[in-house]
Image (spheres, rainbow, N blue to C red):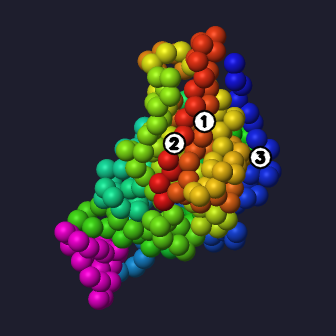
Amino acid sequence: MFSARVSTAAAVLALLAAAGCELPDAEEILPAPNGEETGERTAPAPEGDAATDAHRGSEGEEPPPGGAAQQDASDTLVRDYVTALAATSDPDRMREGLDLAEEGSAAHAYLRHHAGFAQAWVDAGTPLPDAEVHSVDGAHEVRRTREPGTHPVCAVHEHFTENDGRLADLRVDGTDPGPYLSEDDEATDDSEGVHATFLSAHRTVEDGTLVVTADLTTVDDVSLDLDGAVYVPEGSETEEPAAVSVGRYELDAGSGTHAAFIFPGAEPGGELRLGGCLAECSAMVDLALPVPD
């Protein structure tokens, strides 16, 4: 009943693109997520005891609650994480990278969010291409496509730290992404046998665009009106339409889909509102999913 919408890429990407995302030429080839050579290049390891330097903690750092002091992450750990982050055609491969990050950390939440976003495109039948990675001097520029066939956007990932052998913190375009990420599997809503679970939200640092991911399952056959999704900010009844909506629109009984929505200029703390129709419109679906801040 409801058909997928392809948004105008130019307008959306203008909102999402990071400014000045360029790294100098580098020298060493970085493998693709499938292990094949991509032609992307990464800087050679610095001279001296690189392993010692990579694991040396910063002076004066206080230990995090319940753990040892964080320290600069090893090159191998960072490299494997970034490779997983770049595997946007294969969300399962991305989620394998979650084992590299400390649960509850910014690194874990950031990768989990991007894997959920990629999963929505896979469920829609239009997987995103793998991201390109250009690395030099410990900085990793990841160029990913937000919509198939459009110009990629990019962000520089650097200043990784680790705690007890797992990644903890990082900087994306110079900013800690932690305060801009939220995840809460207990934020849910139900309507006519359709169950919605909030997965994650990320408010981009450069322009304040809110990207929300959710899991949708159904007891009966349903047509989801993903195109009609709106966001209602906290304390307001103004409905802001999604600039991009992606996921599977037609669900058979007992099935589900990841879905993702982009709301330029929105802030977390409101509601994602989504409708749909059971078979032959025997009942209307009306979901109001909290988006925790």
Answer above or below: position of 20 versus 32: below
Answer above or below: position of 180 versus 290: below
Residue at the image position 68 percent from the left and 60 percent from the top: 265
Amino acid type of the residue tagged 3 in the rendering: Ala
Image-quadrant location for residue 89: top right
Residue at the image position 48 percent from the left and 71 percent from the top: 176
Instruction: Tell me the residue that label 2 is attached to.
Output: 289
**Cβ atoms at labels 1 and 2 below 8 Å apart:** yes
Camera sees residue 280: yes
The x, y position of residue 276, in whole percent, is 62, 26
Q: What stretch is highlighted in magenta?
A: 49-73
Give yes or no for residue 55 being in the magenta stretch. yes
Mark closer to the chain start, 1 or 2: 1
**Cβ atoms at labels 3 and 2 below 8 Å apart:** no
The x, y position of residue 143, in whole percent, is 62, 55
Which element carries disc 3, helix, strand or loop?
A: helix
The x, y position of residue 130, in whole percent, is 57, 44
Which element carries disc 2, helix, strand or loop?
A: strand
Of badges 3 and 1, the one in the foreground is 1
Camera sees residue 117: no
Q: Residue 65 carries which label?
A: none
Image-quadrant location for residue 18: bottom right
In space, the residues marked 3 and 1 are separated at their CA atoms by 22 Å
Nearest the eye: 274 or 156: 274
Instruction: Tell me the residue that label 1 is attached to.
Output: 274
Mark closer to the chain start, 3 or 2: 3
